[in-house]
């Protein structure tokens, strides 16, 4: 009996669960394999030096792209409902940062994708403001703090961002 108990505990401890996400339509949709592994999410506010200008907030996400297919579109939907297309860069020299004291500087270098994204590439997603990118009808209108992405052969998929580390504000002169 003791051997069986030890075996069951060891087997349970070694078992791995498959990561899943949800499709972009939210709770009605079936679960799908997660092609995005989030390594870090940061936001940083820039306070302009001129009183007539509004502060801006930049988000940056470092992910590992797991799909064999390249991303055809990546968007960020922030807590306030903003819909932003993401520029995609390859990440080199990534080292995890101390979340208690993230500092001003980036903890990685980013370079141009140069036309190809492969499975297991580490990428930076950098949402940009402006542009006229309509939100696809398949996206749930109430989704917030979520990265949306698709490949040529997939529907829109969603990766909820649970935690975003705030970096110190940039104060312009």
Image: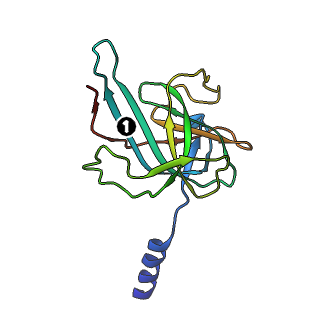
Q: At 28% across and 21% down in the image, what residue appears?
A: 49
Q: Quadrant of residue 97?
A: bottom left
Residue 143: horizontal and vertical position, in percent? 50, 31
Residue 94: horizontal and vertical position, in percent? 44, 57
Q: Quadrant of residue 42?
A: top left
Q: Secondary structure at mark 1?
A: strand
Frontmost residue, 29 versus 45? 45
Quadrant occupied by the C terminus: top left
Residue 81: horizontal and vertical position, in percent? 46, 25
Quadrant occupied by the N terminus: bottom left
Residue 92 position (above or below residue 156): below
The furthest residue to the top: 52
The furthest residue to the right: 153
- Left or right: where 125 falls relative to 136: left
Frontmost residue, 128 versus 34? 128
Badge 1: few (under 14), some or many (20 or more) residues near its Cα, within 10 Å?
Answer: some
Q: At 25% across and 49% down in the image, what residue appears?
A: 101
Residue 52: horizontal and vertical position, in percent? 31, 11
Marker count (numbered): 1
Q: At 42% across and 36% down in the image, what residue appears?
A: 59
Q: How was this image coloured? A: rainbow
Q: At 46% across and 84% down in the image, what residue appears?
A: 4
Which residue carries the number 1 mark?
Answer: 43
Frontmost residue, 124 versus 93? 93
């Amino acid at each position: 009996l003791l051997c069986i108990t030890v075996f069951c505990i060891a087997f349970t401890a070694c078992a791995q669960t498959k990561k899943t996400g949800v499709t972009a339509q939210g709770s009605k949709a079936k679960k799908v394999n997660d092609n995005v592994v989030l390594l870090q999410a940061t936001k940083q506010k820039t306070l302009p030096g001129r009183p007539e200008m509004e502060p801006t907030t930049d988000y940056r996400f470092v992910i590992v792209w797991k799909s064999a297919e390249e991303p055809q579109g990546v968007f960020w939907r922030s807590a306030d409902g903003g819909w932003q297309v993401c520029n995609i860069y390859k990440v080199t020299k990534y080292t995890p940062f101390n979340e208690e004291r993230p500092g001003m500087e980036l903890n990685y270098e980013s370079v141009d994708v140069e036309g190809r994204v492969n499975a297991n590439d580490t990428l930076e997603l950098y949402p940009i403001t402006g542009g006229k990118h309509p939100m696809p009808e398949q996206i749930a209108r109430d989704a917030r703090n979520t990265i949306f992405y698709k490949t040529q052969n997939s529907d829109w998929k969603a990766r909820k961002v649970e935690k975003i580390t705030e970096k110190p504000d940039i104060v312009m002169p």
